[in-house]
Image: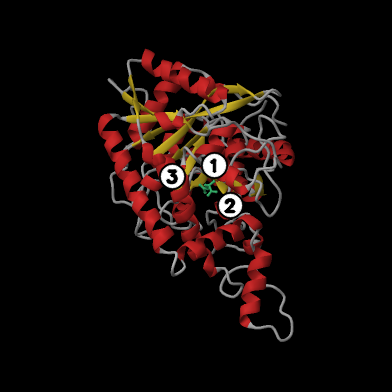
Amino acid sequence: MNQVPGCRQVRDEVMSGRTTCAHVAKNAIDIIRTVDESLGCYHEVFDTEVLETAEALDRQVADGKDPGPLCGVPIAIKDNIATRSGRTTCSSRMLQEYRSPYDATVIRRLKDAGALLVGKTNCDEFAMGSSTEHCAWGPTRNPWDTDRVPGGSSGGSAAAVAAGTCSGALGSDTGGSIRQPASFCGCVGLKPTYGRVSRFGLVAFGSSLDQVGPFARNTEDAAMLLEVISGYDPNDSTSADVVVDPFSENLDRPIENLRIGVPVQMMSDRNDPGVNARIEEAIDVYRSMGATITSVDLPLTDYGISTYYVIAPAEASSNLARYDGIRYGHRCTQQPGETLEDLYSRSRSEGFGDEVQRRIMLGTYVLSSGYYDAYYKRALQVRRLIKEEFDRAFNECDILLGPTSPMPAFGIGDDMDPLQMYLCDVYTVNTNISGHCGISLQAGFTDSGNGLLPVGLHLQAPPFQEHRLLRAARMFESATAHHEAVPENSPG
Ligand code: GLN
């Protein structure tokens, strides 16, 4: 199957003159054209613009210049990240026609590094969901089995990378939306520490939880992307003024005496048996590389889902108040005699899908006077306790290890009630609640009874220890070949 090469390979081939950016760009567009009709990863593909940018980069390379560390590398962008090119819809009718007048900081950084932005990818509406089915324009399909979901909410980006339509992609992770789709699609997905990457231009969902992060087909590519998008940004007061280590350097140097903690809560016998089997094998891989493995008890993480589903909807209800049909977003056609209140209410009912409306109602409820102390304030207190529990665990071990998701990709249209869907995030939400960093890696497959599906290995590291996280991830990759598997059944 024809695949766009990874970030490192594209950059090396372009700079050594073995290929041109224009060739890489044309190939990527061709692959997208062949594959995307059946996968539905992209809302919009920037064909003409990509070719023009590629030719301009080729002229610079021909002049002996180095246009940047991602020169000629095709990258796909989740459609909740503002780009001047095309629309930024968040997969919502509410923003169907929205064109951003500015680029998000992460987009500006990618452009400055010479990347080619190939298009905008599908996601759950306003990043709320775990399946990329709650979308105004239809679902994305999993390249390993097109009857299944790619995970969510950044499912379009994950599937686009796994299917080889681009070298890497950006997604956002509020409670698992990068790591869970990476796990379902068998690629790498990294959620940086809160504050590591600027949120300027990321459409806000849960502002104290949201982070932009990379998808790639291996850890080296993920490190290259993270290096470019990280760093302090005066336009985001929550971005951290912390040194950005050269994440892609020394990646191959194994961490000596690595201390790995395996939270007992994550190895539940309610997980898919194939998931637990792959994680046990991963533990053996690390043990054979000299790591010490200990069990750690994180009892408060059992409260992660309840805490997350108070805080995230609370912040969402406040962030989404701006879409009133006047200042922002879809406006209903006015009927004679209608009041302002009617206009708000009809515009919002028409513009937002069911899941978003559910979150707004939940969020408004937990913030309302009389319930604020019982729900929102309580959730913030539990959040602090969960953070302290992780701090203590990270005093004892360097990395935490477990499955990314209790199950592999489920079927499109499976009859899941909202609560079942929320439980998909059981192992990922705590990272966002506490604010540290995490990564999902392809760890092999589980048999669905109808073919093999990827299983994700979830590693977590303390705040601003992305270099440690990536090096530990690279150790696993160097000892296994799981990351090399490509989805044969992919329509390409
Ligand atoms: N699936 C989770 C939710 O629905 C996480 C979403 C995300 O990380 N953006 O809220």
**Which disc is residue 423 wearing?**
1
User: Of the residues under marks 3 and 1, which one precedes in the sequence?
Assistant: 3
Badge 2 or badge 1: first in the primary sequence: 2
Residue 111: where, in percent of width, then height? Answer: 48, 49
Q: Mark 2 near mark 3, Cβ–Cβ under 8 Å?
A: no
Quadrant of the frame with the C terminus: top right
Type of the residue with mark 1 = Leu
Q: Residue at x 55, y 62 (%)?
A: 360
Q: Of helix, strand and loop, which one carries label 3?
A: helix
Q: Residue furthest bottom?
A: 337
User: In the image, is residue 323 above or below residue 414?
Assistant: below
Query: At 59% across and 44% down in the image, what residue appears?
Result: 421
Q: Residue 112: percent from the left, percent from the top?
A: 44, 48
- Name which residue type carries label 3: Gly
Residue 354 in sight here: yes
Marking on residue 79? 2
> Which quadrant of the figure contains the N terminus?
top right
**Above or below 427: residue 384:** below
Q: Nearer the viewer, residue 73 or 259?
A: 259
| Tag nearer the camera, 2 or 1 | 1
Q: Which residue is mark 3?
A: 304
Residue pictured at 62% horizontal, 36% vertical:
165
Name the element at disc 1.
helix
